[in-house]
Amino acid sequence: MSFRYEMYAYRDIQEAHTDGLLAGNGLSISYSPRFSYGSLFQAATPFMEETVSAIFRALGTTNFELALREINQAISLNGLVGNASGRLPDLYADIRHALVRVVQQVHPEKTDIDTPAGAQAAEGRRHGRLAELGVQLARFKAIFTTSYDLIPYWAIMTAPSSFKDYFFDCLFSSEVPEKYLERIPLHFLHGALHLYTEDKRTRKIVAESRHLTLPRTLDQLYRSGDAVPLFVSEGLSRHKMSRILENEYLSFCYDSLKRQSGGLTVFGLSFDGDEHIVQAVRESALRRIAIGIYTPGMSPEAIMLEQARYAGKFGSDRELVFFDSATFGGGGRGSRRRRLRAPPASSK
């Protein structure tokens, strides 16, 4: 396989790459360093008692959705056969509480994200940086994200008539009403903090009000005992894929990625632990992939090694283009093209 070992500023390639966007946690980190946490489970561990941690270990998971669902099923079964559930309801509540606490710890409020650099939080513009991101997302025909934070959702809500998330009246449906057909779709490949399952259906929390923050909204929702948050927090790709196949919404999003054709722009995603996403891209009809690499501080040799790593993932039958992810969106400065010396072409 051969390809051009060049790095472009994003503005040099954006007009030719508008089919699909696949974004990872790097997008969120570009808006707040608080999104650099490794996983919600790791961040939540200090808030969980040892018995709760032992339940996660016994289940062999770090997935809140799975742990809550298993405990809830155990409580229901005990009720059906007349057995006492003991501490299970309290442990279920402890896990929900840990989840709410960690979300409050790591997830900024919308006003913090929208505040212009150097301004006080109270001076934040309504729909400032998020609206800019919404404009950026609107350049694509389809959007996919592996992150489960609210940055993409908040961004599309600045221009709700331009996008669809397949939640109609807050309930997931793959059947799109006619008036939404031409809107740009957003897919949360690993779920999101505002998504949950209840009565075996996937639902979403509506946009927050001015007086109800995200942690309070989640806390009130999960107090019902029936609502289970939908986000994939497993560390291994095969475990993530198992969770995806168990849920109608996640399966729909994954299949939608496999159905993509034309081009794909990748930003803020290294694919570490996400081999199932690599496989979906491989199985698709995508022919062009533009991949962002964060190059500040990297040597030319390190950049070329990173390019070769991506090339090895996506086979020999696709055109690969690389851009400096530091120039993506509003953060891009200048349009200078940086050329790197290419090693001999490789084949696979």
Image (spheres, grey):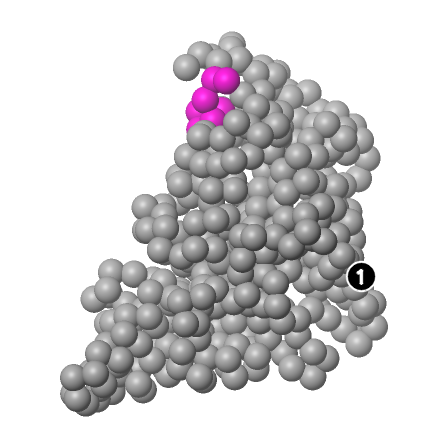
**Above or below, comparing residue 17 to residue 57 in the picture:** above
Front residue of 47 and 288: 288
Q: Which residue is drawn at 76% across and 30% down?
A: 15
Q: Residue at x 57, y 46 (%)?
A: 144
- Asked whether residue 337 is in view, the answer is yes
Give the magenta range. Answer: 309-317
**Above or below, comparing residue 171 to residue 164 in the picture:** below
Q: Residue at x 40, y 39 (%)?
A: 275
Query: Residue 212 location, x and y as percent?
Result: 65, 82
Query: Is 155 covered by the magenta stretch?
Result: no
Judging by the rendered image, the residue that carries numbered circle 1 is: 128
Query: Residue 236 location, x and y as percent?
Result: 34, 49
**Above or below, comparing residue 91 to residue 166 in the picture:** below
Residue 168's image quarter? Answer: bottom right
- Asked whether residue 117 is in view, the answer is no
Residue 297's image quarter? Answer: top right
Instruction: Using residue 11 as the reference point, say whether residue 28 is left or right of it.
Output: left
Q: Which kind of residue does numbered mark 1 sit on?
A: Gly
Q: Which residue is drawn at 48% across and 77% down?
A: 100
Front residue of 229 and 4: 229
